Amino acid sequence: GNSVTQMEGPVTLSEEAFLTINCTYTATGYPSLFWYVQYPGEGLQLLLKATKADDKGSNKGFEATYRKETTSFHLEKGSVQVSDSAVYFCALGPGGYNKLIFGAGTRLAVHP
Amino acid sequence: NAGVTQTPKFQVLKTGQSMTLQCAQDMNHNSMYWYRQDPGMGLRLIYYSASEGTTDKGEVPNGYNVSRLNKREFSLRLESAAPSQTSVYFCASSELTSGVDGELFFGEGSRLTVL
């Protein structure tokens, strides 16, 4: 079946550090891939997406590349800020009606 | 801009009680969804509605019922609450009626505790 596996958190970084959050998936066919972010006390927001192999999604300094050969969609940011502290969810859309399958989420804490 | 509004935000129930979570969106979206969020498990789809008048089961529908009252509103009902239904519930909406673009808009969540 379809599933998403994310690295366990929490991830704790100092401001301006480099961020990587790993995400791998299992799916049949060619799903679209997404990263969502959840700030404290809020609902999830779409951060970036990629719809086919080798696509790179980017937004707010975050990037992720759809790697079909390694079934991965790792999230990266070159220099994190305190305001990036949140929970990040990797998700896949295997097809139809935007019924997304989410990973367990990775909590990021950035300290000054 | 209201977006997706859920009520109530917090609720405590006793085992066996019933309740309804309300959700309304003002973006004229076609599809609506109910997810539950549990620690270590991410979000799991309970039910969705691809258009007004239609509803379908998601991954974890047991113990829940839904109603798509009109295009704006999608409610989730627990007929006989159980402690296993303690969770944070999120309503979401999407413009799409088919296909995938991943652009779901989420409410702020409703935290339900069943004692």
Image (cartoon, rainbow, N blue to C red):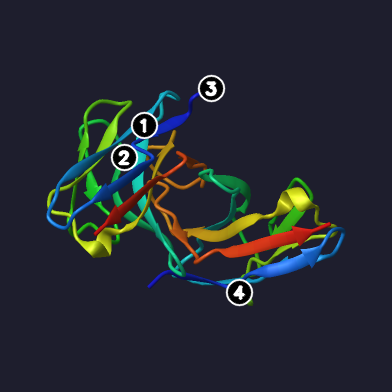
Kindly identify which residue carries mark 4.
Answer: A7
Kindly identify which residue carries mark 3.
Answer: B1
Going by the numbered disc 1, the residue's amino acid type is Asn
Check disc 2 and report its element: helix, strand or loop.
Answer: loop
Instruction: In this rendered view, identify the residue nearer to me: B32 or A37.
Output: A37
Task: Determine whether A34 is above or below B26 in the image.
Answer: below
In x, y percent, where is residue B17? 14, 50
Kindly identify which residue carries mark 1.
Answer: B30
Check disc 1 and report its element: helix, strand or loop.
Answer: loop
Q: Earlier in the sequence, mark 1 or mark 3?
A: 3
Q: Alpha carbon of mark 1 to alpha carbon of mark 3: how far?
A: 18 Å
- Judged left or right of residue A91, residue B33 is left
Check disc 4 and report its element: helix, strand or loop.
Answer: loop
Q: Chain of mark 1?
A: B
| Structural crowding at the residue carrying mark 2, measured as other residues with C-alpha within 10 Å and reported as few (<14), some (14–19) or many (≥20) | many
Kindly identify which numbered label has been placed on residue B50: 2
The answer to whether the residue labelled 1 contacts the one labelled 2, judged by CB atoms less than 8 Å apart, is: yes
